[in-house]
Amino acid sequence: MKHLYLLAPILAIFAIFAVYFLIQTNRRPIPHYEPKQEPEVIFDAEEYLRQLKKDHKPFGTRGVHRLLLKRTRQKAGVYLESLEPALDSIGLEVVNVYHSVMGFEYVPVITSGNDWPYHAQKSKHYENKALDFRIKFLLPEEKKSIVELATKKLEGRARVIWEKGEAEHLHVELLD
């Protein structure tokens, strides 16, 4: 009983060693994730029409979404999986506008869906009702043509905004 006051520090030391031992025995390597590189897809209009004739199946909402992903490239980290189905169709119409201005070889780049935390607080991006397309590296007359054609084509269904500045892009959002 004389040395009972030493019991608490000794138990604390044993507890520290036990936790240290558990941490040391649970050393597992952290798995390394390497995203697979998709081969660059080159759009071939004739092959696309052949596939449409061959399948003779109307596109469902998943088919339209897959077609949008296939006809565009996406900037790393772009999240497009929860888009409104109407936005997939509108995205394909924007792709068609790019092809009419730039030619069928050009593959538009989607720079944002619902993935970037720096959109305005009430942005349609957070509701999965907006897409951003890259126009930053195009010639000024190409940019103007794309914006005008897209605005004309999507009138009444979507708003097209040419956002200028450092992160210049074409913002397309569904109307309420």
Image (cartoon, helix red, strand yellow):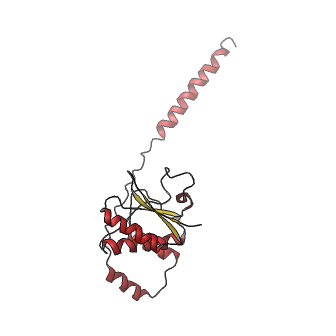
In this rendering, the answer to whether 39 lies above or below 9 is below
In this rendering, the answer to whether 42 lies above or below 109 is below
At x 43%, y 70%, the residue is: 150
In this rendering, the count of numbered labels is: 0
Most extreme residue toward the top, as rendered?
2
Of residue 95 and residue 21, the one placed in the foreground of this image is 95
Quadrant housing the N terminus: top right
Of residue 110 and residue 96, the one placed in the foreground of this image is 96
At x 32%, y 83%, the residue is: 46
Most extreme residue toward the right, as rendered?
1
Is residue 92 in view from this perspective?
A: no
Quadrant housing the C terminus: bottom right
Is residue 52 in view from this perspective?
A: yes
Question: Quadrant of the rendered structure where residue 51 is?
Answer: bottom left
Percent across and percent down for residue 52 are 41, 85
Percent across and percent down for residue 161 are 46, 62
At x 54%, y 62%, the residue is: 128
Percent across and percent down for residue 13 are 56, 24
Direction from residue 89 to residue 42 in the image, left or right? left
At x 52%, y 59%, the residue is: 125
Percent across and percent down for residue 166 are 38, 50
Direction from residue 77 to residue 46 in the image, left or right? left
Of residue 1 and residue 71, the one placed in the foreground of this image is 71
